[in-house]
Amino acid sequence: MPKSLLSGALLAIAFVSIASAQQPPTVRIRGTIEGVDGPMLSIKSRDGADMKVRTTDNVAVFGVAKTELSEIKQGSYIGVTAMPEPDGTQNAIAVHIFPENQRGAAEGFRPWDLRANSTMTNATVAETVKGTDGQNILVKYKDGEKKVVVPPGTPVVTFVAGEKSELKPGAKIIIFGAVKKEDGTLEANRVNVGRDGITPPM
């Protein structure tokens, strides 16, 4: 390879590496809004920490509303918060149903931080059948599939369009990915608010 081309290639690789390194870290926040000052939310996190989160001008607010297990049908795109069983089955702690315009959001299977060793699977329902221990659901995502058992009484919620006015003291919220800025402040472009007093269960 000519020296000039080699230098160019190395420079491109360096830029890609810098860009990757500069992706800002994100923070997942669960808690209660204690105060609102313009775009700044004062939040008491679930572990008791006081946090300040600035919302962006175009912040998207979604309500987290209770729904029924019967709303989960073949083809639904869902998120399952679960505890893994020894046989690999996921025992659901909570299920959220995505609206159609959020199909594909964060698709896949990953560790989650609701409880120690909990998991999150965002995937499409391939099959749902009543079982002896609850509803048995087979979900499929681009890299695989999981068998999920949803025991009776498991919270099932859905996302609905919300308003900025819902960001008020007392509201229970979850922010999936607040961005940590260089100065240490947190910024969010989406806030999910529990409707009718519920705490987002995921």
Image (spheres, rainbow, N blue to C red):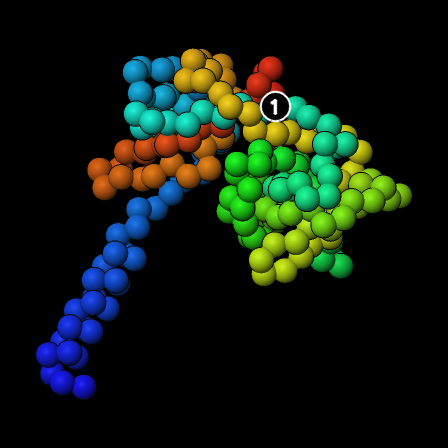
Query: In this rendering, would 104 be left or right of 156?
Result: left
Q: Is residue 66 above or below residue 83?
A: above
Q: Secondary structure at mark 1?
A: strand
Residue at the image point whose x is 45% and y is 32% from the top: 175
Q: Position of residue 134 (x, y in %)?
A: 82, 40
Residue 133 at least partly seen: no
Q: Residues within 10 Å of mark 1 (few under 14, many from 20)?
A: many
Q: Residue furthest right?
A: 132
Residue, disc 1: 65
Query: In this rendering, would 54 be left or right of 85?
Result: left
Q: Position of residue 72 (x, y in %)?
A: 72, 36
Decide which of 73, 148 is in the foreground and name it.
Answer: 73
Work out which quarter of the rendered image holds the N terminus and state it.
bottom left
Residue at the image point whose x is 45% and y is 18% from the top: 163
Decide which of 99, 114 is in the foreground and name it.
Answer: 99
Work out which quarter of the rendered image holds the C terminus and state it.
top right
Residue at the image point whose x is 59% and y is 46% from the top: 122
Residue 81 sits in which quadrant? top right
Decide which of 7, 48 is in the foreground and name it.
Answer: 7
Number of marks present in the image shown: 1
Q: Position of residue 11 (x, y in %)?
A: 17, 69
Amino acid residing under circle 1 = Ala
Query: In this rendering, would 70 be left or right of 174?
Result: right
Residue 135 sits in which quadrant? top right
Residue at the image point whose x is 30% and y is 25% from the top: 57
Residue 130 at least partly seen: yes
Q: Position of residue 84 (x, y in %)?
A: 68, 51
Q: Residue furthest left?
A: 4
